[in-house]
Image (cartoon, rainbow, N blue to C red):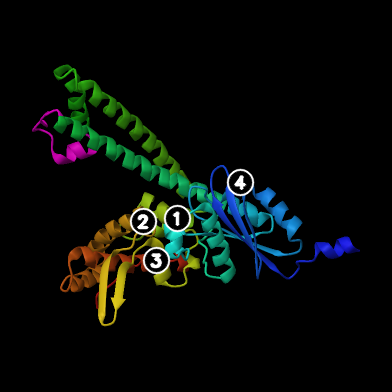
Amino acid sequence: MQRKDSQKIFEGQSVYVGIDYHKKSWKVSIYGEQYEHKTMSRDPDAEQLVRYLEKNFPGAAYHAVYEAGFSGFGSCRRLRDLGVNCMVINPADVPTSQKEKLQKTDKADSRKLARSLRSGALSGIHIPDRQLEADRGLVRQRFRIVKDIARKKNRVKSLLFQFGISMAERFTTAQTRYWSRPYTDWLLSLSGADPMVGPLIDNYVRIVNNLRKELLGINRQVRELSRTSRYKDSYNLLVTVPGIGLMSAMAFLTQLGDFTRFKRLDELCNYVGLVPRMYGSGDKMVVGKLINRGRKELKIMLIEASWVAIRQDPALMAKFNELIKTMPKNKAIIRIARKLLNRIRYVIVHRKEYVTGVVS
């Protein structure tokens, strides 16, 4: 009988666990409702941590939190499967004192997470399912390869400048940017003209060509993904929006997931990072550049789509013309991007194709 009672001794109580996540170990701080249990190092194993909690706090409700980062969401999903109410938090949203910033340690970070979780000061980020996370990884992989190709192209231009090799006059800016076949052949011909620099350029040309082949393969995979039952209907709706194509549509669908979780436009804009920095004191209000939160590529694609949309949607063009009377065009287009994001949300939530606005 005593054994059964001991198994329920913490029933009705909550235990809060802050995890400072590392590849080889976890720094774990455990707090009760009115006390601190201990801070310790443990193997990065969800099952092992849950066994410890069940042994020392039988019958309690377990709550855990760790910061988003390289670890992804696998541990969170596993802890949830084991009965732990786990959340992942944006590191920038963890309340931090100046002392904690000046004396940052793994122990201090885990204790800070546990205390904040207990006080209810944390709001976790959305946890995608494993399939959505993998699909998101594919789309991000495509953007990383595009950036790698751009870096290699820029390094070739730097080499040409460094060794004083003048660009042939017959090549336009567009040809060098997109590496047309004549431009590539000219780069390869430099091996004979300059045997010292030529092999360096040949290496970069070969790397770029290999990356472009990989990019074509990933493009096909993303296109096939857009035709699956999970994305097909939403994809067909999104591409009716001016400026939204294959890659931008799949980026929005995989990154945002369930659009209905954003109850208001402001929540969606904050997630994407389409809100300005603001500082107000007394009668003074300073509005700055866009915040650094959100996926950078989403903001870029949305702004690029907005430039297309104002040419195809008379209502957006009228609004843009009104805005540029009081602000620069690069700021006005951000206002248009907010409106376009709201329309994208409406298209997906209400399952209706985009309708071009009419100026009355």
Front position in the image: 254 or 313: 254
N-term-proximal mark, 3 vs 2 = 3
- Which residue is found at the position 63% from the left and 45% from the top? 43
* Contact (Cβ within 8 Å) of mark 2 with mark 4: no
What separation in Å lies between label 1 and label 2 (alpha carbons)?
Answer: 9 Å
Which image quarter holds the N terminus? bottom right
Q: Which amino acid is tagged 3? A: Asn
What separation in Å lies between label 2 and label 4 (alpha carbons)?
Answer: 33 Å
- For label 4, the SS is loop
- Image-based side of 27 in relation to 8, left or right: left
Q: Magenta residues?
A: 163-180
What separation in Å lies between label 3 and label 1 (alpha carbons)?
Answer: 14 Å
Q: Nearer the viewer, mark 2 or mark 4?
A: 4
* Contact (Cβ within 8 Å) of mark 1 with mark 2: yes
Q: Is residue 233 above or below residue 180?
A: below
- Which residue is found at the position 45% from the left and 55% from the top? 255
What label sits on residue 228 in the rendered view?
Answer: none
What label sits on residue 44 in the rendered view?
Answer: 4
Identify the residue under disc 1. Answer: 255
